[in-house]
Every structure is written in structure tokens, then in C-alpha cells.
Image (cartoon, helix red, strand yellow):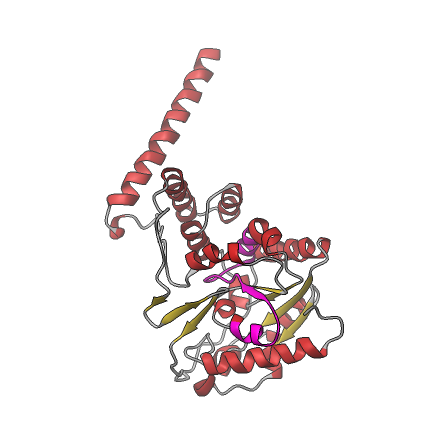
Amino acid sequence: MRKFAINIFSFTLFAMVFYIIALFLWGSFAPNVLKPNINYRIGSWGHMHSRIANIKNYHNVDILFLGSSHAYRGFDTRIFSDSGYRTFNLGSSAQTPIQTKVLLDRYLNALNPKMVIYEVYPYTLSIDGVESSLDIISNDKNDIHSLKMALKINNIKTYNTFLYGLMCDFIGLNKTYTEPISKGTDRYIAGGFVERKMRHYIPTQLKKKEITLNQIQIKNLAEIVNMLKERNIELMLTYAPLPKANYYRYTNNNYFDSLMGTYATYINFNKIMNLDDSLYFFDADHLNQNGVKKFNAKLIELLKNVPNKNK
């Protein structure tokens, strides 16, 4: 029996090592069409690689921004700097609370913010988080927090990309990689913001849908709220402006507002701002630079007019 157990253990260990090596070789040399369950793309859209590399230059910030592309395309660090706030934008593409928790576990101590403004969006609280996990695995270091994230998501694409990323980190494959500041119509701005070349959205009718939240994401949101509370870091949840064509497609926005309001100070900017879809957005989800200026000005006005806000 003892010999049998040793044989099983040895075979399992060999199989794991063989799988990781084979996975790395396949991920490195096979064409993309043949590796749908490995999606390691360093320097992908969103400038996450640049944002992570930029963190070392920011400590003791006044405001840390978190959330999806609505965050890194919506909170312009230059505008807040002009108003006297030192900020950093740690948004990422399709970031769900699972990824937010990973980023806070890694970088909250280094950034040490007085306040966190967390952009919450029904879609990113409804999905499994696979897309955002791949972005972070590919553009940040891989550690125990990456493993925990993969286990929470429990998806073969995340597992494989995580193992491939571990091998890349181990052999230092990306040590010399430098991400271009400008890619296509996007330009990275120091502090985490991504500016999109000016363009205007042509509104289209979108299919109605009901907000159905993922309970794993809600659990992680609660953990984030408690983490910040224990650190005495002020938290504001924001629902960033959307084109009306997109915002009003959701049939139960009041339900979402009511739930978010139970976690922290919460502001739905879709209810307090009236932005024209064609003038202030570049697609069905994101503000153009004119819209960013309007949105940020309104947020700064609120921050300055509420007592005891950290500046």
C-alpha cells in the first residue's frame, strides 16, 4: 500500500510537471487559433502593464480609483491634480470585485490612499471575471493572490493562463518589455488614466435587460468594503455616466442603487448629470474627453462640498 501511494504521488508530480512544460511550449509556439484556453497577452488594450509599472512612483495618494474601463477611461488624474488631489487610477478592463481584491491585496499598502473611489457597474458585478483575470495575469506579477483568483473563478482559461504566466515570470521572459505610451487611438497618462482620441457616439437602440448580480462578486465586494473599513480608508462607490441608450436598457436600476447604497456612500451620476449621448460619449459605454471633463468636474465639486473629505 505504501509503495502504491508513492507511485501515485510520483506519477501525479510527473504529470503536473509535464503538463506545465507542455502548456508553456504550446502557449509559446502554437498559433492562437489552436490555443483557445491560453490567453496570455502582455500589453493588451487598457495599458494595464504601464499602470502596474507606474505604481512605484505613487505613494500616500489622496484618492485611489478602482473599477473597470469606466474607471481608467473616466477618472483623469490630470484634472484631479489641477484641483489639488494626488491620485492614482488602478482600473482595468472588465475589472470585477475578484480582481479588485487582488489589486488591493498587492498595492493598497504601497499606494496608502486616504480615500478610494470605486466605480461599480452592473455588468462587472454580473460576470464571472475571466476576461479581467487574463488581463491581470498577463500584465502583473503572478503570486498567491493570482492562485486564489484562479480558484475563485474556476475556469480552464484562467488556470492555463495563470500557469503559463508563472513560467514566463520564472524565466524572466518579459523583463525587458516596455509598453508603448500610445496604441491606436489610446494614450496612457501617468497615474493610470487612458485618454481616447476624440470621437462621438451615434446612439442605437439596445435590447432591454435585467440586472442579475453574481453572488461571488457581491461577496468579494463586501470583503473589499470591510478591508477598507478596517484600514479607516474612506470609500465612495460611483456609477459612472453611461449613454442614456445604455443606462435605460436596464430595467431594475433602482434595485442596483438600493443595494450599492447599503455598502458605502454611493452616487449614481446617471441620476444627477444629464449628458448628451452624441456629445459626451465615444461608444455605448465610455465618456469621450469632453464627457470626462464634465464628469470629473462634477465629482470634484461634490468632494469639495462634503465636510471632512480628504484633500
In the image, is residue 58 above or below residue 243?
above
Residue 119 image-quadrant placement: bottom right
Residue 232 is covered by the magenta coloring: no
Image coordinates for residue 178, horizontal then vertical, percent: 36, 55
Start and end of the magenta stretch? 78-103
Residue 87 is covered by the magenta coloring: yes
In the image, is residue 107 above or below residue 211?
above
> Would residue 94 be found to the left or right of residue 256 on screen?
left
Image coordinates for residue 127, horizontal then vertical, percent: 50, 60
Quadrant where the image shows the C terminus: bottom right
Viewer can see residue 125: yes
Image coordinates for residue 210, horizontal then vertical, percent: 54, 71
Task: Compare residues 215 and 38 and report the one nearer the observer.
Answer: 38
Number of dots carrying numbers: 0
Which residue is painted at 46% across and 75% down in the image?
286
Residue 63 image-quadrant placement: bottom right
Image coordinates for residue 179, horizontal then vertical, percent: 36, 58
Task: Compare residues 206 and 311 and report the one nearer the observer.
Answer: 311
In the image, is residue 221 above or below residue 260?
above
> Would residue 193 be found to the left or right of residue 221 on screen?
left
Task: Compare residues 122 and 80 and report the one nearer the observer.
Answer: 80
Task: Compare residues 168 and 188 and report the one nearer the observer.
Answer: 188
Viewer can see residue 1: no
Find the residue positioned furthest to the right: 307
